[in-house]
Image (spheres, coloured by chain):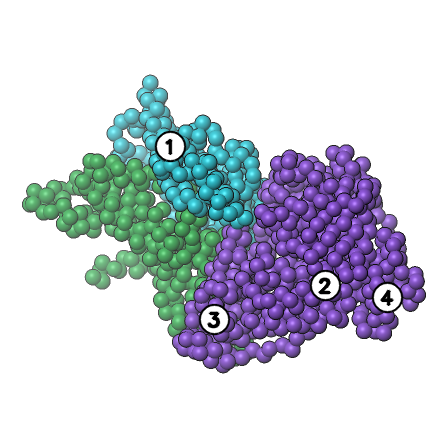
Amino acid sequence: MTEKSKIETTSGKPAHPQVESLCDQLTAGRIDRRSFLRSMTWLGVTAASASAFAGFIPAPARAETPVAGGKLRFGCAIQEITDPALTSWIEASNLYRNSLEYLTYVDADNIVHPYLAKSWTPSADLTVWDFELDERAKWSNGDAFAPEDVIANIQRWTSPDSKSSNKTAFEAIKLVEKTGPHSVRFTLSRPVASLPEQLYSYTCAIVHRDFDKSGANWPANPIGTGPFKLVSFEVGRQATFAKRADYWGTPAHLDEIQYIDLGTDIATHLAALASNQVDLIYRATIAEYDLMKSLPNIQILTGSAAHTLVMRMQVDAKPFDDIRVRKAVQLAADNKQMLDVVYRGEGQIGGNYHVSPIQPDHFALEPVARDVAKAKALLAEAGYPNGIDIELTLGNTQGRWEQDTAQVLQQNLAEAGIRLKLNVLPAAQYWPVWDKVPFGATYWAHRPLGSMTLDLAYRSGAAWNESHFADPAFDAALDKAMGTVDPEARKAAMQTAQTILRDQAVMVQAYWPARFSAAGKNVRGFVLHPADYFRMDGVWLAKA
Amino acid sequence: MPLILFILRKAGQALATMLAVSLLVFLALEVNVDDVAVKVLGQFSTAEQRAAWLEANGYNAPFLWRYFDWLVSFVSGDWGMSTYYRAPITDLIPDRLAATAWLALGALSLIVPFGLGLGVLAGMRPGSLTDRVVSVLSVVTTSIPDFASAVFLSIVFVFWLGLLPGASTMIGGFSLKELVLPVLVLALYSTGYLARITRASMAEVMATPYIRTARLKGASLPRIVFRHALRNALITPITVILLQVPWLLSGVIVVEVFYAYKGFGTLLYEAAINSDIYLIEACAMVSVLVVVTTQILSDLAYGLLNPRVNLLGAPKPAKGDAA
Amino acid sequence: MIRLVRPYLTHPLVAVGGAVTLLWLVLALFAPLLAPFDPLKTILPLARPLTPAPGGGTLWLGTDMLGRDILSRLIYGARTVVLYSTLATLSAYAVGIALGLSAGYLRGRVDAALSFLANVVLSFPVLVLYIVIIVVIGASPLNIILAVVFSSAPAIFRIVRALTIDIATRDFVQVARTQGEGSLRIMLVDILPNATGPLAVDFCLRLGYTAITIGTLGFLGLGLPPPTPDWGTMVNEGKAMAIAFPHLVIFPCIAISSLMLGLSLLADGLKELSEAKGRGA
């Protein structure tokens, strides 16, 4: 390990006071390297100097040199896009991700890097953040990227009539102001350590300051700062992006990317990949695993992520307003069987508190054993001695495994006298009701930190609080976790939050499925980002 | 002149049907005004926004008034905006319909020669080996649902043999190779059906007294078939072919969805699963229009082929009557 | 009686078709007795056919992705497909016959109005009509039956109407009328029994198409909600894995095709018999 004095910040300013303590904790072996790197980059330390301190040897240069040029065909649903801040599908964000950029970039290892913002410096109490914008950045219409753009975006996310999920995520931001030709300052009402990381949420793409004035419809007026420009966009058919010659940063390798809508059936996506009609598909599930293995001309991509199916109960809707009913459901559910049967054990078991073991702030709670007898007793106590009829609404938004999971749950619950009826809607019909149904199965995408998910989904009154869960003690624990840089202290706060959430029996969150996708053999540089945030500027096609 | 009168009368009937269909479709999809607002404005809309939108778009008017308003815009070519595709529906439908027409054309180019040919071969000598083979084949193929043959053909030709592309998006332009599998699935079912009809019709004609007399007089079978039997035997099958078009319109939904073919069937399917009501309305109207048109053509063909039917005259003799 | 039934039993098409259809009907009716396993219970995921089950017994056709016995699901699926189709087709027949008889016998304005209405409904391609109905009222057993009635009754109406018009001109109907029999009695006692031949043929075919349509809706993901076993849904669920586990789709496809085949053969046989009878008379 190198010395602490070699630590550099992205801004060149002196490092945050907590940097030193983080270095000590790492040296003492109290935190792991990944937690260290993440925390350091939040505080504005360069990823390179933090890695060097941690003794990470930079990855050796690739044996292959990227080839520029070519057209990549990406099998992906082409959904409607209007306002990026209102997007509810990550697929859609991956389209505009080629043209729109974010203030920060979080890589597949959850390390934060400079992007449109080239540096950030938090105050000692983590409530004032100074962002220095990259002065080279330019909009495709010729305008210079300026602090006004950032201010306009933050304001439209957090304004009182905003419908964006960003409103909750950035509710702590009190003030955004221009502090120089290329600098902005965020003033927060409470400390938020992970602010730079949150700015890479898929709904946080930075649009031009005149976005609302010009109709708030991105495909109709596709101005962006990114390496590609939108050439054509047809919902349900295809979208094409071409490389921009005048891009301000490192140019992309590919000349053109075409996204092709192959319908909803992943078997068809693989068929298209097998017959070389596309080079890359968005996602596969366990159901297609054997099919993928049988195809000789493709590479299978795998990874893990904190994404999951949450079967949550609304705590204010009958009969779930009685915690004994919710507890009975939780106790009767066999999370291991759902993982083993539906995902053939490919993934990690969940503990009904929606924080994944791969998230660095996860606190490993002692699991609660399945107890059918106790579930029955609780039901009888709640006034249902002869069992109870409940209905679960789901939409298979990520594939049939959602429905399969619900079917195993159905069998589990039957053992405790809970008669579960499944109401399966087409995916598009699920989203309009996802936060309205009393008992619903919602897919939650990966977030780098458990606290980010909890903040969006379970804080009192949060925009995406589908379970209507509200608990001041939980909110307080969450505040504490989010305002803490020290990984150990953060975990302790998370222990409280996780325990409350689990013991209030808000959900059955059975497992964290493994991730799969597939690509043609010549695709290089594609990273299966855990959050499905696919940046395409590093992707290239090897010559056959 | 009777032909023109016939066409005018048929067109009048078609118009009346279309009107009734439009009322039915509108009734089904737009009676519940609140549903319409949610579907058009989406999940993020507030109650006030919906109320304002309903007011601004005349949804507070009485139902019949709204219907006439809708009908007038529909007839004048304003079919509204698709809520899912965010485009005027009149821009979406022609391309999709053309794509489906290619598919149907491809299917018909297999169905017609094979269906008629096999049917005639089988019906020429009822009870012969050819007849039995054709009959068995046709009854088997008409028993396999198109979704089953779609799955099996793609397993065999895409995954095992690697001969054909697995998706037929046609995004890179027209591709004959991408058309093969969907066409094959559609043809497999309908060929058997047409063969059965043709065989029955042919066998019936072969059993008529004048053909039997001709055979007794020693005329050769091919001569009888081509000179006498065929014309009479093909009347029913040809009208059946035209009536297959509505059937194809159903069949294309499964096939197009399975092969990700961007045609009219996928459009309707996606409109349905996304509750895109204006698009569903337009698709339903267009498909009915196609059906009604083919019915007129089929009646016309029947009348032209069968001299015994007066196009303007009394109803066709019912089956079972001595002809 | 035996003399009446005998030609049906000895006719090869009727015998074979009838046997296949009857087999599925019996399986459907007695599913709880005949199915070797609980169709919803996870036994052993993705077992190949003929695998011995862990708790005893054999998984003759293997299990699906969730480890449910495919044979049992097929047998229970016969309930969904065969029973719902039959119920739906019978209801459609009740409506179609009632309206067809009235229109064909009474003629006049009732006939004109009903015929027009039937034409309107029949001008929808079948699947388009089903999809629109399902979008409007949602998928449930009752709604699927309603959709079938709505879309099939007009076709049945047309057949019954044509037959009624034809039969009403026959002598025995004229005689009944002069004897002062009521319209209802004439329609039900004199006309309807004479129309059963062609109607039986149509019933078999229509039942088959209805079964296929219910399967198609399941395949498109618009069918009955899980876990109700349904052949079309089984094909849909298994198709992604069919390359590695063909038994997931082969058996449900065979089931639905064999049912349709049985019904087509039955229809063909009945048609031949009624034509032979017609010639004999």
Instruction: Name the front one of labels 4 and 1.
Output: 4
Q: Chain A is drawn in which colour?
A: purple
Write down the residue under mark 1. Answer: B68
User: Would you say B24 lies left or right of A19 here?
Assistant: left
Chain letter of mark 2 equals A
Amino acid type at mark 3: Asp
Secondary structure beneath dot 1 equals helix
Using the numbered discs, state the Cα–Cα distance from disc 3 to disc 1 in whole angstroms: 51 Å
CA separation, marks 3 and 4? 48 Å
Number of residues whose C-alpha sits closer than 10 Å to that of mark 4, classed few (under 14), some (14–19) or many (20 or more): some
Q: Which amino acid does label 2 sit on?
A: Gly
Q: Residue A483 carries which label?
A: 2
Numbered disc 4: secondary structure:
helix
Which one is nearer the viewer's eye here, B128 or B154? B154
Name the residue at 38% across, 65% down.
C28
Query: Circle 4 sits on which residue?
Result: A20
| Chain C, chosen colour in render | green
- Spot occupied by residue A119 in the image (x, y as percentages of width and height): 82, 51
Quarter-wise, where is residue C76 in the image? bottom left
For the residues labelled 3 and 4, say whether their Cβ atoms are less than 8 Å apart: no
**Looking at the image, residue A12 lies above or below residue A250:** below
